[in-house]
Image: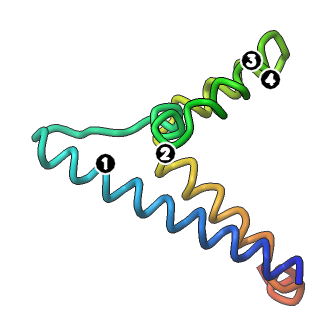
Amino acid sequence: MVRFLVRLAGLFALAGAVIALVIDGTRSIAASAPVTTPLAEAWRGADAASLSAVETALGGSMLTSPFLAVLALPAWLVFGALGALLILAARPARLRAVA
């Protein structure tokens, strides 16, 4: 059951990556130049209050620098990597032993 939920979360993350990639592609075509949307901008557009709450919670901790580095990456890259990792983690044990 847990493996199914992890795989489902991975599929949702991959779907988010495809959606973000299509949005960036559309903006790139309209601008006639490559355009990428950072994760922070996408998060701010979806729910600005939660982003500011996380930023204040991490205010002076050691996690601030890596967190800001991840927020600067393109949204499609973060969602795609997260989805791929979740799907790989949910593989059956017999397939993990072969690879």
Q: Which residue is mark 4?
A: 63
Q: Quadrant of residue 99?
A: bottom right
Question: How crowded is the residue under tag 1: few (<14 C-alpha within 10 Å), some, or many (20+)?
Answer: some
Q: Residues under labels 4 and 3: Cα distance?
A: 12 Å
Of callouts 2 and 4, the N-terminal one: 4
Badges 4 and 1: C-beta atoms under 8 Å apart? no
What kind of element bears circle 2? Answer: helix
Q: Residue furthest bottom?
A: 94
Q: Does the CB distance between marks 4 and 3 fall below 8 Å? A: no
Residue at image point 73% right, 28% down: 54
Q: Residue at x 41, y 54 (%)?
A: 20
Q: Nearer the viewer, residue 28 or 45?
A: 45
Q: Locate residue 19 relative to residue 62 in the image: left or right.
A: left
Q: Secondary structure at mark 4?
A: loop
Marks 1 and 2 in Cβ contact (< 8 Å): yes
Pointers 1 and 3 in contact (C-beta within 8 Å):
no
